[in-house]
Image: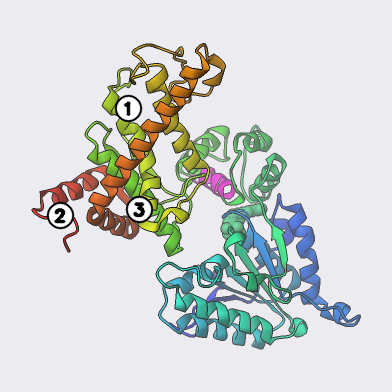
């Protein structure tokens, strides 16, 4: 946000306008290809006659696709800055919670103001919040969102490409967008804005080092090497943190000490923005609560430490358990509890949303893999099945990774088949247990989900308290 930002139309039309963004392409680094593609948009705005003279239709909309913090907003501002036109912006997530009719009229107001100020650029952040495929909402769809989307489509169709308005939208989820948005004459151009590689990170660091005093001994390249996975926003944040620490320590220039501390801080605070879409959010909330509740109801499971909807890295929500002690010795029921809990998120999704809605994704596959690996170890290493009280495979050090099962088969194919059957049986039974626990405690699960959506995190203490309260009620299940 900029100090030049202003709000239009009091409460009804909250979008921002910056007469001059002051941002140039030079301020955006590590996204060369995107800049090249967007260079032409600057020309559309500055010299539209070059295109219209030869009868070319000027594109109206460009979709910037990439994860948060990679510089999409910055790029849009740079286009406006390079072209010297005003920058209007609004965020799709703001539409989501509004009353019926407000979103659509806000879109109308925005385009009206933009036409009065043409040539100009309209930036719609998080367009997926409003631009999701229509008719895909949970519980009968979201009329408000669809009305807003329809209004946006109408507005985009309502002006000619040479009106001098270019609309740039940003999203991390192009796959969920309504196809109508991507048709010719709408957002028919896509530009990828990815997280930076090593060279990109170095260039971004150079941009943000420009206005900072950094000790000569500090190598920006070394910092770039240490920060894989950092986005432009993380890197900007890193140098700013380092500068703040330097000032606090009353030093003249940023040294490697401040950089090191700042890296730690940024890593610790690297949490994504909370989810906005209500269906996905609900699904994840049920998943995490399922995991946490089953882990809690099973006596032999570690206590839950925290449940959170704040995405981090690859995962969209998180549940932590505090391991009680070292797990060198685990009983059969402890192992079963672990398997059951790891399957519980998926089980919750199935119970609540039905089998077709169950999600996959890296982290889910990992949980399934872990559950299966534990079951397999029970059978092959701990002698915990009828196949026999003997060790069929040498325990490896990577206790729960269970990667090399196949390489170690010193038993017959018949035993191998028995093992497979037994492992599947354990996993299936555990899954059924998880499902049953969720079904039996549906009221509690629903209640916890509401709290999680409201608070975004539930600490273990509060979680156990809610469960205890619920369990002490005389008639719990299904009672309303
Ligand atoms: P997005 O819109 O993709 O979520 P932003 O453009 O809002 O990301 O980035 C936030 C801030 O992070 C920017 O204002 C800038 O300071 C820094 N930043 C992000 N990406 C870059 C980049 N590619 N080059 C330089 N700075 C960047």
Which residue corresponds to mark 2? 476
Picture quarter with ligand 1 = bottom right
Question: Was residue 113 drawn as part of the magenta stretch in this picture?
Answer: no
Q: Secondary structure at mark 1?
A: helix
Nearer to us in this view, 60 or 342: 342
Question: Was residue 238 drawn as part of the magenta stretch in this picture?
Answer: yes
- The quadrant of the image that shows the C terminus is bottom left
| Count of numbered marks | 3
Which residue corresponds to mark 1? 335
Main SS class of the magenta portion in the image: helix
| Direction front: furthest residue | 414
Which residue corresponds to mark 3? 351
Q: Earlier in the sequence, mark 1 or mark 3?
A: 1
Is 81 situated left or right of 386 in this image?
right
Question: Within 8 Å: ligand 1 and the Cβ of disc 1?
Answer: no
Disc 1 crowd, CA 10 A, few/some/many (<14, 14-19, 20+): some
Q: Is residue 96 above or below residue 405?
A: below
Q: Secondary structure at mark 2?
A: loop
Q: Earlier in the sequence, mark 2 or mark 3?
A: 3
Q: Nearer the viewer, mark 2 or mark 3?
A: 3
3D distance between C-alphas at marks 2 and 3: 18 Å
3D distance between C-alphas at marks 1 and 2: 29 Å
Are the residues flagged by discs 1 and 2 in contact, CB closer than 8 Å? no
Nearer to us in this view, 19 or 381: 381
Disc 2 crowd, CA 10 A, few/some/many (<14, 14-19, 20+): some
Nearer to us in this view, 447 or 245: 447
Locate residue 345, reporting x and y percent: 38, 46
Disc 3 crowd, CA 10 A, few/some/many (<14, 14-19, 20+): some
Residue 152 figure quarter:
bottom right
Q: Nearer the viewer, mark 1 or mark 3?
A: 3
């Amino acid at each position: 946000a900029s100090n030049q930002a202003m709000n239009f139309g009091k409460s009804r039309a909250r979008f921002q306008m910056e007469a001059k963004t002051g941002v140039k392409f030079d301020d955006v680094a590590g996204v060369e290809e995107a800049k090249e593609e967007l260079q032409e948009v600057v020309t559309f705005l500055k010299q539209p006659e070059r295109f219209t003279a030869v009868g070319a239709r000027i594109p109206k909309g460009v979709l910037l696709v990439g994860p948060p913090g990679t510089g999409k907003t910055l790029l849009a501002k740079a286009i406006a800055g390079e072209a010297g036109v005003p920058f209007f912006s609004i965020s799709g997530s703001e539409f989501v919670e509004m009353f019926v009719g407000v979103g659509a009229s806000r879109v109308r107001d925005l385009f009206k103001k933009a036409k009065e100020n043409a040539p100009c650029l309209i930036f719609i952040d998080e367009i997926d919040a409003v631009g999701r495929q229509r008719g895909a909402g949970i519980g009968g769809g979201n009329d408000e969102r669809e009305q807003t989307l329809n209004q946006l489509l109408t507005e985009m169709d309502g002006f000619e490409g040479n009106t001098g308005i270019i609309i740039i939208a940003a999203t991390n989820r192009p796959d969920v967008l309504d196809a109508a948005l991507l048709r010719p004459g709408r957002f028919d151009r896509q530009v990828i804005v990815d997280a930076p590689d090593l060279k990109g990170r170095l260039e971004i660091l150079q941009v943000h080092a420009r206005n900072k005093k950094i000790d000569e001994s500090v190598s920006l390249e070394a910092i770039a090497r240490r920060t894989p996975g950092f986005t432009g926003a993380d890197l900007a944040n890193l140098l700013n943190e380092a500068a703040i620490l330097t000032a606090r320590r009353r030093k003249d220039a940023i040294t490697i000490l401040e950089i090191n501390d700042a890296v730690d801080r940024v890593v610790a605070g690297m949490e994504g923005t909370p989810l906005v879409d209500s269906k996905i959010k609900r699904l994840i909330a049920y998943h995490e609560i399922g995991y946490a509740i089953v882990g809690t109801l099973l006596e032999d499971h570690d206590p839950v430490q925290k449940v959170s909807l704040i995405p981090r890295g690859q995962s969209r929500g998180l549940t932590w358990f505090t391991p009680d002690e070292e797990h060198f010795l685990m009983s059969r029921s402890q192992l079963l509890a672990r398997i059951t809990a790891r399957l519980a998120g998926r089980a919750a999704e199935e119970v609540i949303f039905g089998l077709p809605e169950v999600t996959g994704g890296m982290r889910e596959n990992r949980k399934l893999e872990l559950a299966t690996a534990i079951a397999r170890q029970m059978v092959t290493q701990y002698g915990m099945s009828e196949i026999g009280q003997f060790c069929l495979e040498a325990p490896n050090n990577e206790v729960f990774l269970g990667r090399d099962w196949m390489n170690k088969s010193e038993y017959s194919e018949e035993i191998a088949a028995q093992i497979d059957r037994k492992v599947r049986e354990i996993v299936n039974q555990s899954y059924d247990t998880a499902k049953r626990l969720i079904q039996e405690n549906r009221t509690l699960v629903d209640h916890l989900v509401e709290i999680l959506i409201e608070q975004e995190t539930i600490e273990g203490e509060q979680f156990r308290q809610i469960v205890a309260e619920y369990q002490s009620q005389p008639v719990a299940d299904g009672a309303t």
